[in-house]
Image (cartoon, rainbow, N blue to C red):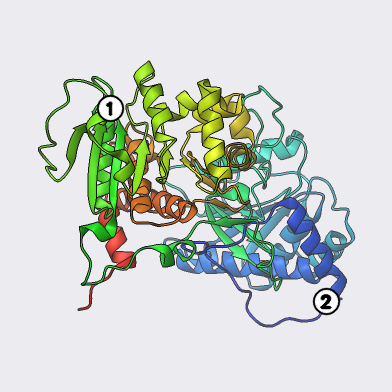
Amino acid sequence: MTVPETTLPTLISPHARALPLLTLADLRILETQAAAALPPHTLMSRAGKAAASFLQEQITRDTSIEKSKQKVWLIAGPGNNGGDALVLATELHKAGIAVDLCMPIEVKPDDARWALDTARAAGVAITTTPPASLDNYTWLVDGMFGIGLTRPLEGIFATVARQLSQRTKAKPLKGGVLALDTPSGLDSDTGTVVGPGPGENQNDGPAVHATHTITFIGAKPGLFTAQGRDLAGSVTVAPIGIDSSARTAVQLNAPELFATFLPPRDFATNKGTFGSLAVVGGDTGMCGAPILASRAALYTGAGKVHVALLGEGAPPYDPPHPELMLHAVDDLPLDKMDALAVGCGMGHRERATRVMHDVLTLDVPKLFDADALNLISNDPSLAADVTARGVQGDPCVLTPHPLEAARLLGTDAPGVQRDRLAAARALAARFASVVVLKGTGTVIAAPDGRLAINPTGNAALATGGTGDVLGGIIGALLAQHVPRYEAALAGVYLHGLAADTLSAQGHGPAGLTAGELAPMVRTLLNRLFYPTAD
């Protein structure tokens, strides 16, 4: 028997918190240690009760359906995830909420058997086959498989996964779909669907698309990157009494990781205090990209922003922002800058390669994006120079999207996407650089092993020019002497939060333009980190 626990479970929202993200290996260690120190069945009891507390709160909040008419359907798998579902069903049943539980295969582990005995004793209705329709239920609960799933969902479990996902996608949505620990079919380490092998479509395997996920002990990386962000829905963490803070190889990006590195904005400062950035790029006919990046740098607080253009026919100045100083690249002393952001619209001509070689000799913080990354991937001497800078203590910042990352690693984009954390780590190690692997759940990796996943951003960023804006934001922070890793963390966080905020105001996700991000970045930067006294 477990020791009775009467206190309400602790539930944590990951919003704006630098939570540790626990891999499967981390979790197994923590579970083993906790199980050895606690009475039998304690962890499963706590997990089920935490889920019950969460679901009861959701039901209470939903004023569109009377509580007495709320009905919950749960499916339990054969392992401990099924045991969690059984405890949840028992707790809801005791609270007077109508529940039906489907258990196609009887649970096997000892803890889950205890949960099954408890549910039966309490009078929970248990069947072995799902109903023809789930329309009569307000909430559906996925307790099929949690972490550690190694093969695709099959048979009845694959069928139910599709049924649950259909509910999530229904318009209007009635109630919701709650996944216990992680949506069944999702790899909690990588955020990909379990099953497809190398070269296969990552959407081939079935997986539950939930509206909400309550995850136990600690948050998992796969809930915040790749397909996991869509499949998990809104994530809540239930620590269930286990301290996971000591295992922080991977973290969720949040202001507490970078806020103290942002420069103070004292009265006795001037434009020189906040640095000079040069955005280097813009071959003939491609000056739009560096202009976008430069405007973003202005809005992120750089003291002076220069645009060093490689091509011909560029305008003499930027009419909306005459503060920007436009130059031919040979006319600007790049060694006098506080930071460089290189690559936007740079092209692939021999002139661009020469500029890259020149830039890599300078003792100035450097960010490489877009065409600069493709030049590095195609030129072993440039790649060696980038690595050498990092080994010498002057790491570059690389900001690839998955295809650019694949070229740098000598693989393909699906290979990068199968394990985004591993790809970011590999890039950081190979080039001794800070790496920003863009995409849903952007991964930020440092050559010293630090790793973070960014929780902000949405589909509004899936439009041309947003990557240029990100390069300008990070470049501006480098010019303000923010360390490389922290500049990347801050830039990615603010860039994504700007898209989230604008979307919440009705300006996205459809149709938001890259140029709209920078003014919102300025607003957020001041609101969050430089509030003025009333």
- Left/right of residue 9 with respect to residue 39 in the rendered view: left
From this view, report whether residue 12 is shown above or below residue 431.
below
Gap in Å between the C-alphas at discs 1 and 2?
67 Å
- Helix, strand, or loop for circle 1? loop
| Image-based side of 517 in relation to 135, left or right | left
Residue 407 drawn above or below residue 177 = above
Where is residue 362 shown, x and y percent of the image? 41, 40
Give x and y (percent) for residue 191.
Answer: 61, 42
Specify the quadrant that holds the C terminus.
Answer: bottom left
Residue 340, image quadrant: top left
How would you rate the neighbour count of disc 1 (Cα within 10 Å): few for under 14, some for 14-19, many for 20 or more? many
Q: Name the element at disc 2.
A: loop
Residue drawn at (55%, 49%) of the image? 224
Instruction: Name the one closer to the observer, 458 or 494.
Output: 494
Of 469 and 116, the residue lying toward us: 469
On screen, residue 460 versus residue 203, left or right, reads left
Mark 2 is surrounded, within 10 Å at the Cα level, by few (under 14), some (14 to 19) or many (20 or more) other residues, namely few
Q: Nearer the viewer, mark 1 or mark 2?
A: 1
x 70%, y 52%: residue:
23
Q: Looking at the picture, tell me which residue is in the foreground, 415 or 103.
A: 415
Q: Which residue is mark 2?
A: 2
Amino acid at the residue labelled 2: Thr
Amino acid type, residue under disc 1 in the picture:
Gly
Residue 162 seen in render = yes
In the rendered image, which residue does mark 1 sit on?
Answer: 282
At 59% across and 33% down in the image, what residue appears? 417
Residue 95, above or below 79 = below
